[in-house]
Image (cartoon, rainbow, N blue to C red):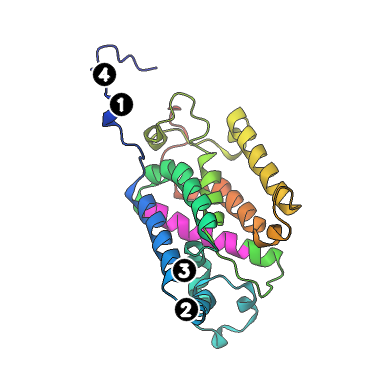
Amino acid sequence: MTDNQNMAPTSPASEPAVRMPAVVWAAIVLMIVIHGARTYLLGAAADDWVLYHFAYLPARYLIPVSEQDFGWLTGPVTSSLLHGDWLHLAVNSFWLAAFATPLAERLGSLRFVVFWIASAVVSAFVYGAAMGFAPAYLIGASGVASAVTGAACRFALPIRRSRDSRHARTARRRGIVEALRQPSVVMFIGAWALSNGLVVFGIGLPEGEADNIAWQAHVGGLLFGYLAFGLFDTVSARRPAA
């Protein structure tokens, strides 16, 4: 541990109450603005138009490209910015605040945005394939939130010295198998898997609500973030652990 006996004490008041990179703030604010506009400004017909063109509709990809509109291209990404209700948005926002913060600080804004886009696309198509490309909309940042969680398992969760997300900037990237030897990672993934398993069977949820939760996208996102994190990360895997 760093010896800071000779350092002047830092006043707790000088520490920000919420410390998130600008790109994470921007993503959350954008999602709030979009949902607010859909809820309070758009009529039913206009909102249906938004969903058709900007949500992810798996059945769309069974139609030839020549017969598609721009929703074929935008849906997999822009669906991550749409939400079903305020609770859905709040849960995803809090999850992103916790796990996207260290990832964005490590990757920087540009690579974080690229990671967001890639994880949104992958989680959407995992959901689509699992559903047999059925005509059912997918919306929400849950796939991205799961992806940033998977990525955090490779560098942030193993850190024991401090909860300060700034240590994640230089923490050593753990290997795919190596990270699974970390008790904190195993326990977290186990808890995550259990919570999603309960969703599959609708345990603890109102009747019929489990059908509205795309756990397949969660699984796709987590696996993508965990397995593909090294493609976005520039910190050496051989760097001593922070």
Cα distance between the residues tagged 4 and 1: 9 Å
* Label pair 1/3, CB-CB below 8 angstroms: no
Residue 182 appears in view: no
The stretch in magenta equals: 110-125
Q: Secondary structure at mark 1?
A: helix
Q: Residues within 10 Å of mark 1 (few under 14, many from 20)?
A: few
Q: Secondary structure at mark 3?
A: helix
Q: Residue at x 58, y 63 (%)?
A: 124
Reading the image, the residue beneath label 1 is: 12
Reading the image, the residue beneath label 4 is: 9
Height in image: 105 above or below 49? Answer: above
Q: In this rendered view, identify the residue nearer to me: 215 or 157.
A: 215
Q: Residue furthest bottom?
A: 67
Q: Earlier in the sequence, mark 1 or mark 3?
A: 1
Looking at the picture, how far across and down is residue 235, in whole percent? 41, 39
Reading the image, the residue beneath label 3 is: 39
Cα distance between the residues tagged 1 and 3: 39 Å
Q: Residue at x 67, y 38 (%)?
A: 190
